[in-house]
Image (cartoon, rainbow, N blue to C red):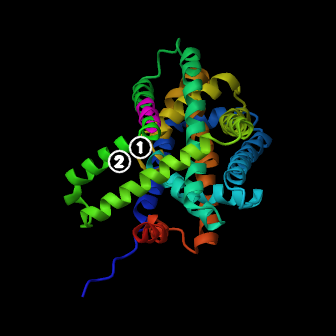
Amino acid sequence: MDKPQKPKTVKIPMIISITLSIAIFIVIIFFTVESSTLDQLSKVSIKYEFFLVAILLNILYWVLWGTRIYVLANTMDKNVKISLWKSIKIVIANLFLACITPSMAGGEPVRIYLLNKNGMTFGCSTAVVLGERLIDAVFILIMVPIALFIFKDIKDLGVVSLGLTIGVFVFVIFVILFIYSIINPNKTKSFLIYLSKKFRRFFKKDSESKIIQRINYEVDEFHNSMYCFTGQNKKILFLASILTVMFWSVGFLIPSFVLLGLGLPPFFLESYVAQIILLIIIMLPLTPGSSGVAEVSLYGLYGVLIGTSSSALIGVFIILYRLISFHMNLIAGSIFQYRIFNSVASFSMDVLKKRDENIESK
């Protein structure tokens, strides 16, 4: 008798992400917090209202993201009405897995699943989420050259420059493959079937016909979803693009207000483009939630902006910024995920099991 398979969980990446984050905080405190740091903090007039503004900006970031999902979802499927509050809850619930998975990729299946749970078909749910990523990719591709132009005279970025170069290369390759897969679904199917045959021995022993059926279904679903998305009302796409610029811009303002709270210049423009560079780097699938990678990159980027005169505060800035932009998301995401799934650690792609059964029955 076969033993029942244990459901896959996210306990390991969750533990790794939290452990890495705590370890990085300890390292930052050890290497950056000295007697000079305490002296400088005692001389600085800490403005707590700016920390509050940074927290409110992070909440506004969630709201604007939810508004984008609300606009896209209700346009994609006219027979389904998803409220703005439900869209915001979907965003917050997806933050937990996004925070503990490399490249923040864990949030996508959560959003697809919850959109489907609220009445949308899997095809339309997938189109909404992949459409979001497509709009994000266009925004980032437009902003990266601007960021590089503004930072072109800064030579002291060190390892951050290498990370940025690799990140931009990987990102561009990903976008090209993404677009190619939309344009050429049949070639995409052939390539994936070829890969499945080569690496089949490393995965569970499904029959070859079952694997091919799954690939054909997924690629068709992906192609039809993206065709449906790009064929929608151009005014809605324009509105979604505006919301994309707004919610990323709101998120990019958070570090400036943390700096203001510490009595430092906000570097609004420089910080904005630094966040674009940081976003490219943390998209590399290196660690769960980019823990460690984000902190090192922040040190390289903002250490240059803050300068030697206030270098004693760089560690304090990184800790405060990550508490707001990462740990606040992690905590809020875990609360909403628990309320929806009655579990924090047990959600995985297993929640999409019904979808797999539907594929097999077709």
The answer to which of 306 and 347 lies nearer the viewer is: 347
Report the residue at 42% width, 25% height from top: 165
Q: How many marks?
A: 2
Residue under pointer 1:
185
Q: Is residue 79 highlighted in magenta?
A: no
In the image, residue 149 sits, relative to residue 341, either above or below, namely: above
Q: Residue at x 53, y 35 (%)?
A: 279
Q: CA distance from mark 1 to mark 2?
A: 6 Å
Q: Position of residue 147 (x, y in %)?
A: 57, 21
Q: Are marks 1 and 2 in contact (CB under 8 Å)?
A: yes
User: What residue do we see at 44% from left, 69% from top?
Assistant: 350
The amino acid type, in three-letter code, at marker 2 is Lys
Q: Nearer the viewer, residue 101 or 30?
A: 101
On screen, residue 360 above or below 229: below
From the image, give the main secondary structure of the stretch colored magenta: helix
In the displayed image of the protein, which residue is found farthest to the top?
153
> Magenta span covers which residues?
171-179
Q: Quadrant of residue 258?
A: top right
Residue 200, located in which quarter of the rendered image?
A: bottom left
Return the residue at label 2. Answer: 189
Residue 222 in the image, given as x and y percentages of width and height: 48, 50
- As helix, strand or loop, the secondary structure at mark 1 comes to helix
Q: Residue at x 56, y 43 (%)?
A: 227
Q: Is residue 31 visible?
A: no
Closest to the observer, 319 or 178: 178
From the viewer's perspective, tell me whether residue 64 is left or right of residue 345: right
Q: Is residue 52 visible?
A: yes
- The crowd level at tag 2 (other Cα within 10 Å; few <14, some 14-19, many 20+) is some
Neighbor class of circle 1 (other Cα within 10 Å; few <14, some 14-19, many 20+) is some
Amino acid, disc 1: Pro
Question: Most extreme residue toward the bottom, as rendered?
Answer: 1
Q: Say if 97 sits above or below 158 in the image.
A: below
